[in-house]
C-alpha cells in the first residue's frame, strides 16, 4: 500500500478551494500550502490574498508564496516538510520536472476537462465556447508536458444550456474535490493504475484573450450564446450600440427565425432584447452599457430608449 502521510497542496484561485477543503474534511494531512503571491485586484487595486491562502490560514496550515519556484532554496524548503505527494489544483504556474518528482509519489493534478481534451489554461471556458454538452474532471499524474501525464481517474458531468464559465467552474470544482479524495483512497490501496493519454484525441485550451470578445452577429444564435456564456466573467462578449460598448448576458436561443439583418433588434420587452443573428434569434435578459452597471433589461428600458430596428455592432 502507498504511504500518503504528508501532502503539500498547490493552488491559488477559488476553483482550488473545494479540493483543499475536501482533503481537510477527510482527514488528509496537508503539511503546507503553496499559492501565488498576494496581488492587487479590482478598481481600487487593493491587495488581496488568494482564496486558497485564506482557507489554509484558517486551518493554521503553513502557506508559502514564492515569487520564484525554480530555485534550489525553494526546493530545499519543500524537502523540510518530507512530503509523500504534491497535489496541484489551478496553481497557475508550470512546475519544473525537478519539483514534480520531488516527493516519492510524484505530483497529481485536478484538471477541469476530460483529458486528453482541452489541455491548457482555459478548459472550462473552451468547453462552453465550443458548444460542448459534457465536460468533467481528470485526476492525472503530472509530467513535464502541459496536461500530458497519465490519467488516474475521471468523471464526467453535463454542461447546462445556461451555464457560464463561472457557474460551471463552481460545479466542477466541487466535483474535483470529491474525485480527488476518491483518487487518494484508491492510490493508498494501490488501486489507481495510470492510463496513458491518447494523443490522437488531444486538443488545446489556450488562455482567453480580449480579441475573442467582439460579437459577430453574422454567426448563429447558438454560437453567440456560447460566446457570451464562455467569456463571462472575462473578457465578456461585447458589441456596440450608438458608439458605446454593450455587453449582453443570460442569452437564450429562440426557436423562431427571421430575415432581418444580423444584429438588428427585433423586439424589446420586459423579458429581454431579441436580436437577429446569421442563423436564428437570440434573446438576452441582462445587459451592461458602457458607463452603466449590469442590470436586467426590464430595469434598463425604464431609463433608456431602446427600440426595434436598431442595429447592434455597427461602427
Image (cartoon, grey):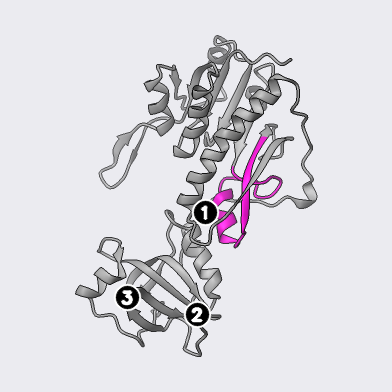
The Cα atoms of the two marked residues, 1 and 2, are separated by: 24 Å
Q: Is residue 140 left or right of residue 300?
A: right
Q: Nearer the viewer, mark 1 or mark 2?
A: 2
From the top left corner, tell me how far across and down residue 297 is, in percent: 31, 70
Give the crowd class for mark 2: few <14, some 14-19, many >=20 residues within 10 Å: many
- Seen from the viewer's position, the closer of residues 115 and 291 is 115
* Badge 3: residue crowd in 10 Å (few <14, some 14–19, many ≥20): few
Report the residue at 24% width, 80% height from top: 305
Q: Is residue 289 above or below residue 45?
A: below
Image quadrant where one finds the C terminus: bottom left
Q: Quadrant of the N terminus?
A: top right
Residue 215 in sight: no
Identify residue for label 1: 208
Does the CB distance between marks 1 and 3 fall below 8 Å? no
Which quadrant would residue 244 be assigned to in this image?
A: bottom left
Instruction: Tell me what residue is drawn at x 34 percent, y 86 percent.
Output: 308
The disc placed on residue 83 is none
What segment is highlighted magenta in the picture?
Answer: 112-139
Residue 111: tell me if it is visible: yes
- Identify the secondary structure beneath mark 2: loop
Q: How far is disc 2 from disc 3 in space, using C-alphas? A: 20 Å
Name the element at disc 3.
loop
Residue 243 circle label: 3
- Is 122 magenta? The answer is yes
| Residue hosting label 2 | 277
Amino acid at each position: 500500500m502507498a504511504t500518503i502521510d504528508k501532502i503539500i497542496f498547490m493552488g491559488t484561485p477559488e476553483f482550488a478551494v473545494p479540493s483543499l477543503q475536501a482533503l481537510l474534511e477527510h482527514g488528509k494531512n496537508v503539511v503546507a500550502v503553496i499559492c501565488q503571491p498576494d496581488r492587487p485586484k479590482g478598481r481600487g487595486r487593493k491587495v488581496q490574498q488568494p482564496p486558497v491562502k485564506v482557507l489554509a490560514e484558517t486551518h493554521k496550515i503553513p502557506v508559502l508564496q514564492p515569487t520564484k519556484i525554480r530555485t534550489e532554496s525553494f526546493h530545499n524548503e519543500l524537502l523540510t516538510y518530507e512530503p509523500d505527494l504534491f497535489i496541484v489544483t489551478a496553481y497557475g504556474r508550470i512546475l519544473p520536472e525537478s519539483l514534480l518528482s520531488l516527493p516519492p509519489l510524484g505530483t497529481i493534478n485536478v484538471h477541469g476537462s476530460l483529458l486528453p481534451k482541452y489541455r491548457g489554461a482555459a478548459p472550462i471556458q473552451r468547453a462552453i465556447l465550443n458548444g460542448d454538452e459534457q465536460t468533467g474532471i481528470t485526476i492525472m499524474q503530472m509530467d513535464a508536458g502541459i496536461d500530458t501525464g497519465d490519467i488516474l481517474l475521471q468523471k464526467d458531468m453535463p454542461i447546462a444550456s445556461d451555464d457560464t464559465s463561472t457557474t460551471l467552474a463552481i460545479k466542477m470544482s466541487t466535483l474535483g474535490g470529491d474525485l480527488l479524495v476518491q483518487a487518494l483512497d484508491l492510490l493508498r490501496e494501490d488501486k489507481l493504475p495510470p492510463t496513458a493519454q491518447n494523443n490522437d484525441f488531444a486538443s488545446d485550451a489556450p488562455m482567453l484573450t480580449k480579441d475573442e470578445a467582439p460579437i459577430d452577429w453574422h454567426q448563429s444564435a447558438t454560437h453567440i450564446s456560447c460566446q457570451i456564456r464562455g467569456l463571462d466573467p472575462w473578457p465578456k462578449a461585447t458589441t456596440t450600440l450608438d458608439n458605446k460598448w454593450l455587453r449582453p448576458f443570460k442569452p437564450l436561443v429562440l426557436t423562431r427565425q427571421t430575415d432581418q439583418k444580423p444584429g438588428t433588434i427585433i423586439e424589446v420587452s420586459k423579458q429581454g432584447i431579441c436580436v437577429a443573428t446569421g442563423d436564428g434569434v437570440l434573446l438576452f435578459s441582462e445587459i451592461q452599457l458602457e458607463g452603466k452597471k449590469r442590470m436586467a433589461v426590464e430595469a434598463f428600458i425604464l431609463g433608456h430608449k431602446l427600440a426595434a430596428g436598431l442595429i447592434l455592432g455597427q461602427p
